[in-house]
């Protein structure tokens, strides 16, 4: 006797355990939520778009243009669909009090005047308070307004490595110093990375975190210094994409050449691109002829 499995499959499509049942075809069709407009970006990420509910990390040494790449992604998400954007919203958690307003303005200006309307900047927050705001306030608004689920949102943390944590601040105020082995930052990021996709449910969100990459002394006398990412190694294993940024001065001295590499993940193979970046911090931000933030 030949059994028609259609009825069986239809019944199994509903999960009583709270998960989502999907097919291979549906997973393929729904894997990209925010299209990338530039071929270089598509190549770097190994995809035509940024996957929704995936954690992305951009790590590198100071002044390697990590934040600039984040600003560019924000501009793409917040810009008008008529110009190739997404008409979305971006939340930028400024956790180090070091972002250049002129650089941010000039990068967004390259995507159009209205782009800045979709960006919300949050400052003077510790890392755990920023995560709490995202998990409560931001998600609550999206779940309250049903139509908001049609609006893509990008959340940027700049940066994890330089962010304060509430426990460390309180300990410093109380005792005047912080001893070794105080790992609240890694603890917060571990649980954030592991649980955020469950907390988001079906909210169309992409998270991009800026990290500081530092050198640590080798554990063996003959070994070279080892690079490590601040904020906890859990990010390396949970990332959808881990991008390593390097910057060197151009031979002309006018700008930098930025080298971006992705590590191999389940989403793509290792990739590398090099970008010439020029920006005149003293330029006239009202005129694109005297401003290089979007080049």
Image (tube, helix red, strand yellow):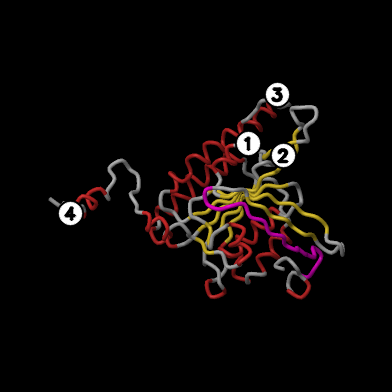
Residue designated by label 3: 175
Task: Quarter of the image for the C terminus: give it.
Answer: bottom right
- Residues at marks 4 and 1 touching, judged by CB atoms closer than 8 Å: no
Toward the left, the furthest residue is 1
Alpha-carbon distance for marks 1 and 2? 23 Å
Please report whichever mark, 3 or 2, sits nearer to the chain's N-terminal start: 3
Please give the range of residues in magenta.
Answer: 266-284
Please report whichever mark, 4 or 1, sits nearer to the chain's N-terminal start: 4
**Residue 293 against residue 188 in the figure, above or below:** below
Percent across and percent down for residue 231 are: 64, 38
| Closer mark to the observer between disc 3 and disc 2 | 2
Alpha-carbon distance for marks 4 and 1? 58 Å
Residue designated by label 1: 165
Alpha-carbon distance for marks 3 and 2? 31 Å
Please report whichever mark, 1 or 3, sits nearer to the chain's N-terminal start: 1
Residue designated by label 2: 227
Residue at 39% across, 54% down: 144
Residue designated by label 4: 4
Alpha-carbon distance for marks 2 and 4? 57 Å
Alpha-carbon distance for marks 1 and 3? 15 Å
Please report whichever mark, 4 or 3, sits nearer to the chain's N-terminal start: 4
Please report whichever mark, 2 or 4, sits nearer to the chain's N-terminal start: 4
Relative side of 83 to 179, left or right: left
């Amino acid at each position: 006797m030949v059994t028609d499995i259609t009825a069986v499959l239809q019944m199994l499509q509903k999960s009583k355990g709270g998960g989502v049942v999907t097919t291979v075809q549906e997973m393929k069709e729904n894997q990209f939520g925010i299209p990338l407009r530039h071929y270089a970006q598509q190549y770097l990420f190994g995809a035509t778009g940024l996957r929704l509910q995936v954690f992305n990390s951009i790590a590198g040494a100071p002044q390697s243009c990590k934040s600039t790449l984040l600003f560019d992604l924000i501009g793409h998400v917040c810009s008008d669909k008529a110009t190739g954007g997404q008409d979305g919203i971006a939340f930028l958690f400024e956790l180090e009090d070091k972002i250049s307003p002129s650089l941010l303005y000039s990068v967004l200006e390259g995507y159009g005047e209205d782009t800045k309307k979709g960006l919300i900047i949050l400052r003077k927050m510790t890392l755990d308070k920023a995560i709490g705001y995202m998990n409560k306030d931001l998600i609550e608004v999206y779940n309250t307004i049903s139509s908001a689920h049609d609006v893509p949102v990008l959340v940027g943390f700049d940066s994890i490595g330089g962010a304060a944590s509430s426990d460390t601040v309180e300990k410093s105020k109380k005792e005047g110093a912080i001893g070794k082995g105080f790992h609240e930052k890694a603890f917060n990021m571990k649980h954030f990375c592991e649980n955020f996709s469950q907390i988001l449910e079906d909210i169309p969100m992409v998270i991009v975190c800026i990290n500081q990459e530092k050198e640590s002394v080798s554990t063996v006398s003959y070994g070279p210094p080892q690079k490590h990412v601040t904020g906890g190694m859990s990010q390396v294993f949970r990332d959808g994409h881990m991008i390593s940024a390097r910057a060197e001065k151009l031979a002309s001295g006018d700008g930098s050449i930025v080298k971006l590499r992705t590590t191999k993940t389940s989403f793509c193979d290792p990739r590398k691109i090099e970008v010439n970046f020029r920006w005149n911090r003293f330029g006239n931000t009202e005129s694109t002829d005297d401003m290089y933030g979007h080049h």
